[in-house]
Amino acid sequence: MSDVEHDRTILSVRNLVTVYPTRLGVVPAVDHIGFELRAGEILGIVGDSGSGKTTLARSLLGLVAAPGRIVSGEILLHGRDLLEFSGEEMRQVRGTEIAMIFQNPIRSFHPGFTIGRQLTEAVTRHERVSRRDARERAIEALTWVGMPEPAIRMKDHPHQFSGGMLQRVMIAMSLLNEPAVLVADEPTTALDVTIQAQILELIQRLAVDRGLGVILVTHNLGMVASICDRVIVMYAGQIVEEASVDQVFANPSHPYTVGLLDSQPDRATGTRLEAMAGGSPRMTDLPPGCRFEPRCAYAETECSQPPTLWPLSDGQTVRCWVSRRHGGLPDLPDREASRAGRGLG
Amino acid sequence: MILFAARRLAEAVAVLFVLTFLIYVIGTIVPGDIAQQMAGIEGATPERMAEMRARLGLDRPLMVRYGEWLGNAVRGDFGHSLFTERDIAADVRQQFPVSLEVAFASVLLAVVIGIPLGVYAAVHTGTIVDRILRGISLVFFSVPTFVSGVLFVWLGSIILKSYYTSFYVPFTEDPIANLRSIMLPCLAIALPTSASIIQMTRTTMIASLQEPFIDTARVKGARESRVRYIHALRASLGPVVTLIGLLFGALVGGLIIVEQIFNLPGLGRGVLLAIAERDFPYVITATLVIASVYIVVNFIVDLLYPILDPRQREQT
């Protein structure tokens, strides 16, 4: 891994729309999403459950569960549009160019097969290699993720590992074909807190040492703060804010981002947690204007019109009329009162 | 694994032992006996009955008779039929392979029909084919064997006249003729049996396809066929294998009927006749043989379980 080329754009997503038909109408789970991912970069995608972040992640691999489907947009990987690919071409992309790891490592392994078999399978699906070569590559990857006695543990079944160890195996598996992009969907949610840090460190090494572009899907801003370079905040299927990690924490410019930050436990200040008022809108019955407007403490009359993504400064973009007019969110001297006044407190 | 197998084997033998006693007791408390049968209604004076019972050894205490029977049975001597007066062991040796063949062929057929159709229905949930399959299997499941059996006799004698042989030919004599002679009886048993296999396979397969490891397989770049037929199917087999073991028990009832309808010289027909004649020694021997097969099959299922699901290995 000597000639790792960083900062080159490897993945660019443009105007991606993924919908789920439901009985109450078509739900735009991913609504005109666009972003760029560079080699060696960790991009956080943050949002509530139901914000579309997991659908976005699955869209990238062409694994949207039926009846959901991608209706428009582009997913350019090294300049080639994955949405033009046939099923077989897309299958080849999965694992070799885009890898994915999941939330629950224990349930993400087949209970009936050995770890070794599941690892080597990831190689043999794409290449004609001897079993011994595939095995050696698997052992090498296990060594890289810090598995003790990898050659012996290859013969074990998933239930003989802890959750943290399995997530390491999962990461090892995603490495086998040296992909350019790793999509990590809540990779530490099911793990013990002490293990979470180890897994995050491992993911960080993937980006830094091996030059992978990592998309980290999470609802945990603390995790974003510790390893991400840039953040996309999603709300009701849309990007509401995109910024560097520093910008998001120092100068959050969308009221939803502010709400997210307020509802994070913060050891340093020890202030009381602030629960966000209201709930996400029903995706079949979205507000006509800004989708956050009904729960927003900053809302003004123009917010009844749908806002567009607006560049603020230095790569920070935000989908908010108020921020756009003031160049950032103004101070809200009495937010509590304002909320109470709007009947949301 | 060997320890596990040994323990299961010991359990199986113990169960078999308890079974002999239960069958013996149940067989004795059933009202009516061979003496009455042999004496006939008008000749059944109390004196004549007593004499008959003494001659047949039915007047001695239950435990004494059981002990004697068990002692002989262990040596392979199951006594003589009270009705035909022939050697029971010899009769059963002839009848047993017929029933065993029909039973195994039926289950094999049911599996060959049931698992692929169940998988297909699971993969195509909600489609027309899935619904039709569910309807058909419900019908198969609901039609009793004596109805489907008669239907197949009709089918065999009218439509497949040139193909079907209505008398049993042993496999060792002529394999082809043998298969022809058991084809329809096996179908009569296999169809209702396959119905439950279809349902079980469908249900577990649908559940497996929802599991996160299915996504993992897809993310690795496995083809959809591999995801379904290797990853999902393998994870679904445990309950299906258990069901197949249990179905062997339900099979016995079907076997008795089908052997009667299709005129097969098997254990089932023998039992039916023996029950009608209160031929107690024969009934107990045949029941024991049938129970043994059931126990052996479930012993095999028990051994298969930890192979199919490695998580079971440590717990045993």
Image: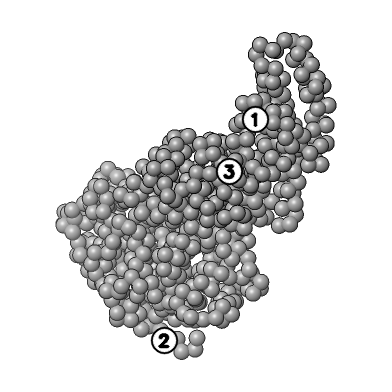
Q: Residue at x 34, y 67 (%)?
A: A62
| Mark found first going from the N terminus, 3 or 1 | 3
* Residue B246, visible in the rendered structure: no
**Frontmost residue, A222 versus B301:** B301
Query: What is the x, y in percent for residue B51?
Result: 79, 16
Residue underneath mark 2: A5
Element at label 2: loop
Q: Quadrant of residue B76?
A: top right
Q: Residue at x 70, y 12 (%)?
A: B44
Element at label 1: helix
Query: What is the x, y in percent for residue B203?
Result: 45, 48
Residue underneath mark 1: B274
B239 vs B33, left or right, is: left
Query: What is the x, y in percent for residue A133?
Result: 56, 81
User: Which residue of the protein is positioned furthest toward the front in this rendering?
Assistant: B162
- Front label number (3 vs 1): 1
Amino acid at the residue labelled 1? Ala
Query: What is the x, y in percent for residue A31?
Result: 25, 62
The correct choice, above or below, for B163 with respect to A172 in the image is above
Residue underneath mark 3: B248
- Front label number (3 vs 2): 3
Amino acid at the residue labelled 3? Phe
Q: Residues within 10 Å of mark 1 (few under 14, many from 20)?
A: many
Q: Chain of mark 2?
A: A
Q: Chain of mark 3?
A: B
Could you tell me how far apart the alpha carbons at marks 3 and 1 are, in whole angstroms? 22 Å
